[in-house]
Image: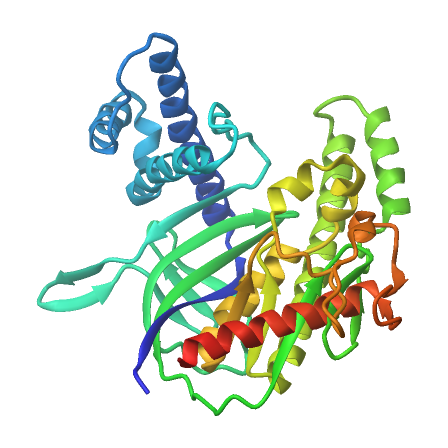
């Protein structure tokens, strides 16, 4: 089996000193300033019907900005460069949206604060070294400008094999984290295909398998607690100390919800992959589902896209296959026994039905998962020919 290169992520909790914390916050501000500056310039050029600046021109202009604002010299220059590339990526995503006129949004203080830095191989005094180094055994990491920072996480691991590509430093709910992207070489163990499973993703039941197993769509957010905090926040004076305290509590509440959902997705995907070699899912039109007012609120509490994303890379690592069937395949309308298509099942409220042709009773979601599995079998057989 050939060796493949993967990009694996490791997330550690950071414990910076007061000086390091101040520098991290200053870097957040600097990268936000660079991003917003060139986004403002982009909007002006659009309004004046002028040609947009290339990344190379923006990088050159950034040098003039650093001379104009000396405080930008205090932070890592690589982080400033990456913010320009992030803006370019935001523009690419804009072109992929249905509404191509929708422009990237400005970055705001206190919301999704993070910056990225790349790892460089340097040679000094005849010795080679990396700008980002991690020592899990002694629980510390060396980052540009910050030097050695205390970390915690992966205590059962002695070291990280592979080449560190970049690091992302972020602040979430008052805590600091660093995410390390490492390029690793792995050799997936390919086993003979012995089982295949179809998965139907939904709103009422998060995941329904062709084997009849259902995973409920749990709501991990304490809505009663959130309602109380938002009510308290509305009574506070804007930007007061009390409002900052309540905002931090709200952030912690959402962080707890994200962590629980992430754990749930990881647990479910591990269970599915442990007993199956081919996993078949639908290629869902997520944008359309989000725009549907009837299901958009429920959709925001699910992790449909995340499940498919996690299954995709775990299948690659374990030498298994993930198949996606056509987006408009009517899996819920077709009888999995005789193949009769029931047009009445376009109504999402019908959860159980009896086939008019063969008189078999069906659970809507289990029937859909079985049909998805059959489509996967057809696709697999075509691959063998």
Question: On the image, which quarter does residue 293 sit in?
Answer: top right
Pick out the residue farthest to the top.
48
Please tell me which residue lies in front, 376 or 141.
376
Residue at x-position 48% and y-position 69%: 313
**Residue 108 in the image, given as x and y percentages of width and height:** 55, 30
Quarter in which the N terminus is drawn: bottom left
Residue at x-position 22% and y-position 29%: 63
Judged left or right of residue 241, residue 130 is left
Please tell me which residue lies in front, 326 or 145.
326
**Residue 207 in the image, given as x and y percentages of width and height:** 73, 66
**Residue 223 in the image, given as x and y percentages of width and height:** 86, 46
Residue at x-position 48% and y-position 81%: 318
Judged left or right of residue 230, residue 261 is left
Quarter in which the C terminus is drawn: bottom left
**Residue 162 in the image, given as x and y percentages of width and height:** 33, 74
Residue at x-position 87% and y-position 32%: 232
Task: For residue 152, say whether it is visible.
Answer: no
Question: On the image, which quarter does residue 133 sit in?
Answer: bottom left
How many labels were placed on the picture? 0
Query: Does residue 13 lie above or below 97 as drawn?
Result: below
Task: For residue 373, say whether it is visible.
Answer: yes
Please tell me which residue lies in front, 18 or 49.
49
Pick out the residue farthest to the left.
126
Query: Does residue 33 lie above or below 170 as drawn?
Result: above
Pick out the residue farthest to the front.
357
Query: Does residue 323 lie above or below 224 as drawn?
Result: below
Please tell me which residue lies in front, 76 or 114.
114
């Amino acid at each position: 089996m050939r060796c493949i290169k993967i990009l694996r992520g490791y997330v550690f909790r950071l414990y910076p000193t007061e000086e390091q914390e101040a520098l991290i916050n200053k870097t957040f501000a600097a990268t936000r300033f660079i991003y917003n500056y060139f986004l403002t310039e982009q909007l002006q050029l659009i309004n004046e019907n002028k040609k947009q600046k290339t990344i190379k021109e923006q990088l050159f202009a950034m040098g003039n900005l650093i001379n104009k604002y000396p405080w930008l010299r205090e932070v890592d220059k690589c982080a400033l460069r990456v913010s320009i590339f992030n803006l370019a990526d935001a523009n690419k995503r804009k072109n992929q949206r249905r509404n191509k006129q929708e422009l990237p949004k400005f970055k705001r203080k206190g919301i999704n604060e993070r910056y990225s830095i790349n790892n460089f191989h340097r040679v000094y005094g005849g010795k080679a070294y990396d700008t980002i180094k991690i020592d899990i055994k002694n629980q510390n990491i060396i980052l540009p400008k910050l030097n050695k920072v205390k970390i915690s996480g992966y205590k059962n691991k002695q070291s990280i094999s592979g080449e560190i590509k970049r690091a992302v430093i972020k602040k979430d709910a008052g805590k600091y984290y660093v995410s390390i992207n490492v390029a690793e070489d792995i050799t997936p163990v390919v086993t003979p295909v012995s089982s295949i499973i179809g998965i139907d993703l939904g709103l009422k039941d998060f995941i329904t398998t062709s084997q009849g197993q259902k995973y409920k769509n749990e709501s991990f957010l304490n809505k009663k607690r959130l309602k109380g905090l938002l009510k308290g926040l509305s009574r506070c004076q804007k930007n007061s100390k009390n409002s900052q305290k309540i905002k931090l509590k709200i952030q912690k509440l959402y962080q707890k919800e994200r962590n629980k959902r992430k754990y749930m997705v990881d647990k479910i995907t591990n269970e599915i992959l442990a007993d199956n070699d081919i996993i078949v899912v639908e290629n869902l039109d997520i944008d359309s589902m989000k725009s549907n007012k009837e299901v958009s609120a429920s959709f925001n509490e699910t992790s449909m896209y995340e499940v498919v994303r996690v299954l995709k890379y775990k299948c690659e690592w374990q030498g298994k296959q993930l198949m996606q069937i056509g987006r408009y395949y009517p899996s819920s309308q077709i009888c999995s026994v005789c193949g009769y298509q029931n047009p009445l099942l376009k109504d999402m409220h019908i959860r159980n039905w009896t086939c008019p042709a063969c008189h078999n009773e069906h659970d809507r979601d289990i029937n859909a998962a079985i049909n998805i599995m059959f489509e996967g079998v057809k696709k697999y057989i075509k691959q063998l020919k």
